[in-house]
Image (spheres, rainbow, N blue to C red):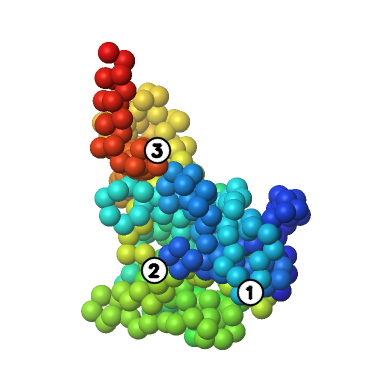
Amino acid sequence: MTLTEYGLTPARAAQQPAELTLARITTQDRTLYTAATETGPVRAEVAGRLANMAAGPEEFPAVGDWVLLRGTPTAGDVAIIERLLPRTSVFSRVAAGRSGAEQVVAANVDTLMLCMALDENFNLRRMERYLAVANASGAMPAIVLTKADKAPDLTDQLSAVRALSGNAPVVFCDATRTDGIVSLAALIEPGKTVAFLGSSGVGKTTLINRLLGEDRLATGAIRENDAHGRHTTTSRDLLLLPSGGIVIDTPGMRALSLLDADTETTFADITDLATQCRFNDCTHQQEPGCAVQAAIAAGTLDPERLASFRRLQEEQAVNVALRGRARERAKIDQIFGSRKQMKQVMRTAKQRRR
């Protein structure tokens, strides 16, 4: 294998100093990584200096990242990651818990495959959420609708998704048939990286196995009572496809907490209408001359879509504030060890000035 097969471009290759080795992260197991190099895969860990300088978990390598390794490691070594190269795109979410910290799901992705099942799990508001995050990631979104054989009304469901998809291509497929897989495969170009994202049970791993041409990744059954899947995929893996494309499989997400979201692009219909309102600061509630409310009254805009737009904007604002506080705490811990120790240092400095 060569790094070109892993998506290496001339611009990226030019970022490699002579004394370091260029590599791409293919798997992560807590603090230990697997990285692809020109001489083969190696295990790797982050250098202490890089770890100490990181202000938060988002500044550590993630699957899909390009990194520079110390020296020229061999397969039997544990390589040292000296540097994380700038990302061309990053898909992040708020990490589980109440810290508000950023969790990088996949990096340097060209296309985000946003998967949603056409069965009882079909949810337009969820797809709007995924699109908002994808549009802010730097990658191009594509919508993949799975389980077409279980769709209660395929025509209406496709129309509803295409109405909110913007410029994102929409494909639908049934993993038991080949026609949908062909349409999906056509979206994956050689040397380009795609990541499959979606809730548990939508069939992401099954689709990837079909693209791989073998059942390499484990799949799980669907619960009959609510059509939700179990978390079969528990890690992130970067895999090479026979077609020459590169795919990242990600764990299913019970919830996608917003961090960076592009609501302007995702809800372009609403933002375009807003420019026609009488008042520049229109809240689209009860103001006279509101073009958004006029569209709702005329039946050309779904009020649920407007409500979704507002919810996502509000949620993003809250999570951005939480992330700011999380980064502040991380910086304090990095410099002083803890907030308590910081206060002690400040008290000592104040006493010395007296």
Q: Quadrant of residue 23?
A: bottom right
**Residue holding disc 2:** 252
Nearest to the observer: residue 58 or residue 250: 58
What amino acid is at disc 3? Answer: Ile
**Residue 290 seen in the current view:** yes
**Residue holding disc 1:** 75
Q: Does 283 sit left or right of 184 as displayed?
A: left
Q: Position of residue 127 (x, y in %)?
A: 40, 58
Residue at 31 percent of width and 34 percent of height: 342
Residue at 33 percent of width and 76 percent of height: 230
**Residue 146 seen in the current view:** no
Nearest to the observer: residue 221 or residue 272: 221
Q: Say what secondary structure mark 3 lies in.
A: helix
Could you tell which of marks 2 and 3 lies nearer the N-terminus? 2
Is label 3 in contact with label 1 (beta carbons under 8 Å)? Answer: no
Cα–Cα gap, marks 3 and 1: 36 Å
